[in-house]
Amino acid sequence: MTFSIVGYDPIEKEWGIAVQSKFLGVGAVVPWAKAGVGAVATQSYANTAYGPTGLELMEQGKSAQETVELLLADDPHREMRQIGVIDAVGNVATFTGKECYDWAGGITGLHFAAQGNILVDEKTVEAMARTFEQAEGTLAARLLAALNAGQEAGGDSRGKQSAALYVVKEKGGYGGYNDHFIDLRVDDHPDPINELIRIYQLQQLYFAPSNPERVVSIEGEIKLELVGYLTHTGYLPNDTANDEEIHRALTSYLHTENFEMREQQDGWIDLEVLQYMKEHSLA
């Protein structure tokens, strides 16, 4: 009752999983990953021990295929399991047990493994594979595009309920304190993939680093707009503030609205923040 895709970006050194299911809170069950080690998707009567154990095996140097074989070897219910694995260097493996409910199967390709069970038909995993191979952009964007394509091709024959996106990267978490680069879940929603995409876009707005081409000096029309928005939202008492007062007000706004990742040196602003201010000051 689930379809997923695990993937790897060899340039950015990112490992990730995107998954959708007619199952409550699929993000708490299927995706497992560790930066520099690999990623595991365990589903179809999921054996959640496959996640941490699989990562431990790959951390010991086992390949994706070796990891799958070792996980299955001692599992008396292996024919009910489905798993997709990608290791530290991008080798992939997928397994679908003979007792998984139709349609069930998987496809592997360069740096990805797509799999699903209780699907309408094989078109779901075919669409995920094709889209991941053809899509451009970040690993997260490609995983989401593949997941969405899988849904459009048929998806889970029982319907939709939850979805998740999990991407790890060394020191990629908030503040650089862990590897949880992107960890987003939609636990119960009538359209979970589109909701996941919406939340991902918010995550990028708040936590993605600023594009240097979108960072500008606070002067001229930019300054007038900024002062207007800060005044309208109460961060400035009036529109006659000096540069120091504007900087303090902007800093307060950024920290209050959780835009600290897009904070710039004094006298500069990220246009993504200014656009957000415009949209929400007029709301």
Image (spheres, rainbow, N blue to C red):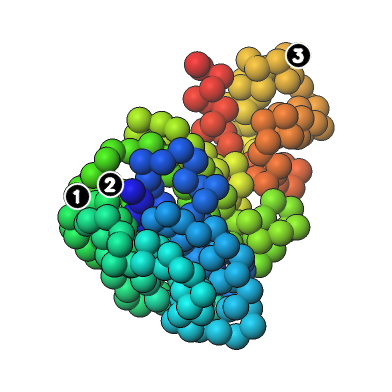
From the viewer's perspective, tell me whether residue 29 is left or right of residue 125: right
User: What amino acid is found at the position of numbered circle 2 in the picture?
Assistant: Asp
User: What amino acid is found at the position of numbered circle 3 in the picture?
Assistant: Pro
Q: Residue lying farthest front?
A: 76
Residue 200, percent from left and from top: 48, 44
From the viewer's perspective, tell me whether residue 191 is left or right of residue 127: right
From the viewer's perspective, tell me whether residue 54 is left or right of residue 91: right
Q: Residue 218 is drawn in which quadrant?
A: top right
Indicate which disc, 3 or 1, sits on the residue closer to the N terminus.
1
> In the rendered structure, are the residues bearing label 3 and label 2 in contact, judged by CB atoms less than 8 Å apart?
no
Residue located beneath label 3 in the image: 237
Is 150 rendered above or below residue 203? below
Disc marking residue 120: 1
Residue located beneath label 2 in the image: 156
Q: Residue 232 is drawn in which quadrant?
A: top right
Indicate which disc, 2 or 1, sits on the residue closer to the N terminus.
1
> In the rendered structure, are the residues bearing label 2 and label 1 in contact, judged by CB atoms less than 8 Å apart?
yes
Residue drawn at x 46%, y 61% is 41
Q: Nearer the viewer, mark 3 or mark 1?
A: 1
Indicate which disc, 3 or 2, sits on the residue closer to the N terminus.
2
Give the Cα distance between marks 3 and 2: 54 Å
Q: Nearer the viewer, mark 3 or mark 2?
A: 2
Q: Nearer the viewer, residue 135 or 33?
A: 33
Label 1: few (<14), some (14–19) or many (≥20) C-alpha neighbours in 10 Å: some
Residue 245, percent from left and from top: 80, 27
Q: Nearer the viewer, residue 42 or 35?
A: 42
